[in-house]
Image (tube, rainbow, N blue to C red):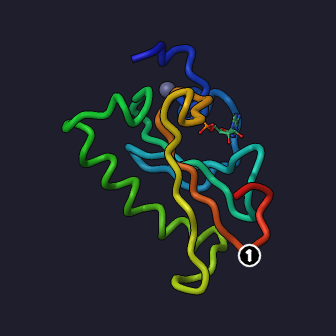
């Protein structure tokens, strides 16, 4: 684990750094990406600090399951069109070669009418 005290997304989940909140419960927090790559682009994170998907273990199975199952509901609430004509993309960047810049596990959820800025 890195240093949660110094982690941008831990601070966002705790409300210590402002964000445009999408969702919050005891375990999960979601907020709009500051540089959206699509008409809908938010980040879904566990409040628990986990550096990356590469650091996740069996003890995190339930929280990762909850994140995955919450994504479609929040995507629709945020304006993504329904499957199958609509839909959304989920991305978890992992490590430098995976394009991970913030080392607190997060799922990008992107959607909305194309074209998108990236992808
Ligand atoms: P990644 O490259 O997968 O680590 O993605 C990090 C994402 O966090 C990028 O898409 C950034 O635009 C986003 N980001 C960085 N700082 C903030 C912030 N303060 N509030 C919201 N999103 C942020
Ligand atoms: Zn963190």
In front of the other: 78 or 119: 119
Are there few (<14), some (14-19), or many (20+) residues within 10 Å of tag 1? some
Residue 78's x, y, as percent? 64, 68
Q: Residue at x 66, y 73 (%)?
A: 79
- In this picture, is 39 found above or below 65? below
Which residue corresponds to the image point at 38% horizontal and 43% vertical from the top-left? 27
Residue 17 higher or lower than 77, as above or below: above
* Residue 10: x %, y % from top left: 53, 28
- Drawn side of residue 94 relative to residue 81, left or right: left
Q: Which residue carries the number 1 mark?
A: 113
Residue at mark 1: C-beta within 8 A of ligand 1:
no
Looking at this view, name the residue that lies furthest to the front: 97
Q: Position of residue 116 (x, y in %)?
A: 77, 63
Q: Secondary structure at mark 1?
A: loop
In the current view of this chain or complex, which residue is farthest to the left? 58
**Residue 83 screen position, x and y as percent:** 52, 82
């Amino acid at each position: 684990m890195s240093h949660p005290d110094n982690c941008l997304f831990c601070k966002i989940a705790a409300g210590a750094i402002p964000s445009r909140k999408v969702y919050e419960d005891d375990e999960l927090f979601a907020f709009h990406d500051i540089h959206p790559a699509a008409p809908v682009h938010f980040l879904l994170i566990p409040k628990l600090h986990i550096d990356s998907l590469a650091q996740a273990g069996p003890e995190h199975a339930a929280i990762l399951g909850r994140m995955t199952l919450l994504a479609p509901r929040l995507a629709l609430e945020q304006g993504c069109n329904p499957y199958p004509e609509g839909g959304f993309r989920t991305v978890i960047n992992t490590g430098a070669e995976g394009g991970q810049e913030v080392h607190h596990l997060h799922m990008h959820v992107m959607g909305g009418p194309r074209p998108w800025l990236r992808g």
